[in-house]
Amino acid sequence: MHDHGTLTPTVMTVQRIVEETPDVKTFRLAPVDVADGSWRHAFDSGQFGLFSVFGQGEAPFGLASSPTQVGYIECSIKRQGKVTDAFHALAEGDQVGYRGPYGRGFPYDELVRKNVVFVGGGIGLAPLRSLIWNCLDNRADFGDLIVVYGARSTGDLVYKRELDQWLARSDMQTVLTVDPGGQDEAWRGNVGFVPAVLEEVAPTVENTLVVTCGPPIMIKFVVQSLLKLGFAPEQIITSLEMKMKCGIGKCGRCNIGHLYVCKDGPVFSYAELKDLPDEY
């Protein structure tokens, strides 16, 4: 899909804000001039947008809602600097700017008729959430769907209501985990690091693609676990959103070897990355 992004931001209204964790909020946005819920935004799961708080700056964030959603887009933003602080200070009804979509998304067509394993860590579930709902809304097109998701602690798990919905569904398998020491009294999921839990789940390699997103250290060990389970580099797809700044390949902040995460990604197969400098 080609970028539809123009240089002039679309003015969006913040329709809803959900506090996911103490430092992550999800923002539901719709264009100010299409308030009737009919707006359709054409993008691929895994693409990102450039979001701005007027007067405070602009930053790239993955689109967290599914392209199957009508009337709005969502992004989940972790507080970690000036622009993200400005987003966290917003109230419902405020206006922000949006440009997008940008970048290369997940290869949806390649996933069709295959088993798909989603492996997420922390806020890394955001782009995966877009793809998971995309697949669930077209459930008949896919084989087995497995979600393995973990965070440092129970308080750091995002989309808790949706995690409960996924756990309750019989047409997918959802495995949740928190790092050792991160559990509370009420926790009924696994305790352990995502790569180890993934090895226990041991998804079938045959006709399967794995999509992963999370902290770089997690991705590194998830890839090692997958190779150990017998997956080929071509079967492993990852999103590297940690390194972007400008979003259009100008600032040079996100290059890995000869690739720019923003222009050539943020989605790559491990086959594309494995010979590059060990930066991701």
Image (tube, grey):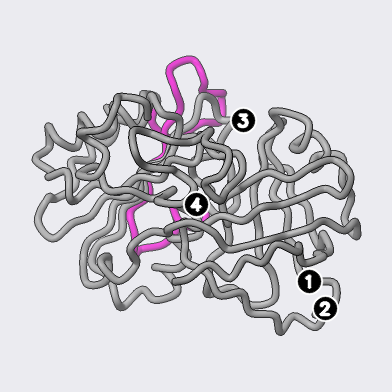
Of the numbered discs in the image, which one, if any, rests on residue 35? 2
Of the numbered discs in the image, which one, if any, rests on residue 155? 3
In the picture, measured across the screen, residue 174 lies left or right of residue 58, that is left
Q: Earlier in the sequence, mark 3 or mark 2?
A: 2
Q: Earlier in the sequence, mark 3 or mark 4?
A: 4
In the picture, measured across the screen, residue 6 lies left or right of residue 134, that is right
| C-alpha separation, residue under disc 1 versus residue under disc 3 | 32 Å
| C-alpha separation, residue under disc 3 versus residue under disc 4 | 20 Å
Q: Do the residues under discs 1 and 3 have CB atoms within 8 angstroms?
A: no
Q: Position of residue 66 (x, y in %)?
A: 53, 66
Q: Is residue 133 above or below residue 33?
A: above
Tell me the kind of residue under disc 2: Ala
Q: Position of residue 268 (x, y in %)?
A: 33, 48
Tell me the kind of residue under disc 1: Pro
Residue that numbered label 1 is attached to: 31
Q: Do the residues under discs 2 and 1 have CB atoms within 8 angstroms?
A: yes
- As for residue 170 lying within the magenta part, the answer is yes
Residue that numbered label 4 is attached to: 127
Range of residues picked out in magenta: 164-190
Quadrant where the C terminus sits is: top left
**Residue at 34 percent of width and 67 percent of height:** 108
Task: Check disc 2: other Cα within 10 Å, few if <14, some if 14-19, many if 20+.
Answer: some
| C-alpha separation, residue under disc 2 versus residue under disc 4 | 25 Å
